[in-house]
Amino acid sequence: MKNTTTPSRALFAVALTFLLLLPSCKKTMTTEVQPGIGYVNAQSSSAVTYEYNNLVWSDEFSGTTVNTGNWVFETGGGGWGNNEKQYYQASNATVSNGTLVITAKKQQVGSNAYTSARMKTAGKHQFTYGRIEARIKLPLGQGLWPAFWMLGANIGTVGWPQCGETDIMEHINTDNIIHGTIHWYNNGHASYSGTISSTPANYHVYTVEWDSAAIRWYVDGVKYHEANILNNINGTDEFHKPFFILLNMAVGGDWPGQTIDNTKLPASMYVDYVRVYQ
């Protein structure tokens, strides 16, 4: 998505060579490497056994309001580094029936013609490695940009992209494509992305499994993307440090475009739970 100090974000994948090395001892893995490219072919056969059975943190959204012991709201407009159109405010995030609801609205606040919500666990909960997942249902509409993602907890001192960013789930407009991406610093901004076709308007479980060897992306347990970070390959040292979690929905921006289908507003992103296992 983008960082909390509103840097510019390039929305293209930088072509990089990822050397496939052995995974950590937490799992056994047999993979097939696509010759000449060097990343794991998500469609190849692989047998993976994970041991992320210890639930270390979760929010089941079982109350009547957002738990501010878990989340911090970010507020304001200004484009958020991506020329977005919304003003973020806490009132656009509600909890009911065990579900977090983040709603984008056609609502004028200052120079912003739209409102939405953006929340993070920064300063509350941060994690290094594990399985991070959420069960989410997404709205479809031109100009909508919901995301479930993570930023390096040291962003306040090193900035972005030096802090690292892991986008667990991003979706734009009316597409049926889910995006998973990492951003980091390697003599400049670098990124590495994968996609999978899905049915975003239905509930799905979006997951990354992250260890000292790799970051792997899943939808409903199906792996579609993998990035090698073993031994800080290609400058990926950012991904061996603590990260915090974010949830938000932007309106407009450089990636989804500046055309907004107002007939789809208000539009809501529904989050059943967020869980972290180690």
Image: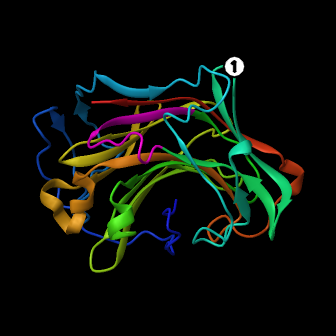
Residue 197 falls left or right of residue 32: right
Magenta residues (range):
121-135
Farthest right residue in view = 263
Q: Nearer the viewer, residue 255 or 126?
A: 126
- From what the image shows, is residue 154 above or below residue 185? above
Q: Is residue 183 visible?
A: no
**Residue drawn at (80%, 71%) of the image:** 111
**Residue drawn at (68%, 67%) of the image:** 84
Residue 236 falls left or right of residue 73: left
- The kind of residue on which mark 1 rests is Asn
Q: Position of residue 174 (x, y in %)?
A: 71, 52
Residue named by callout 1: 97
**Residue drawn at (70%, 51%) of the image:** 89
Instruction: Name the main secondary structure of what is drawn in magenta.
Output: loop
Rendered image quadrant of residue 101: top right
Rendered image quadrant of residue 233: bottom left
Farthest bottom residue in view = 187
- From what the image shows, is residue 244 above or below residue 193? above
Q: Position of residue 197 (x, y in %)?
A: 55, 45
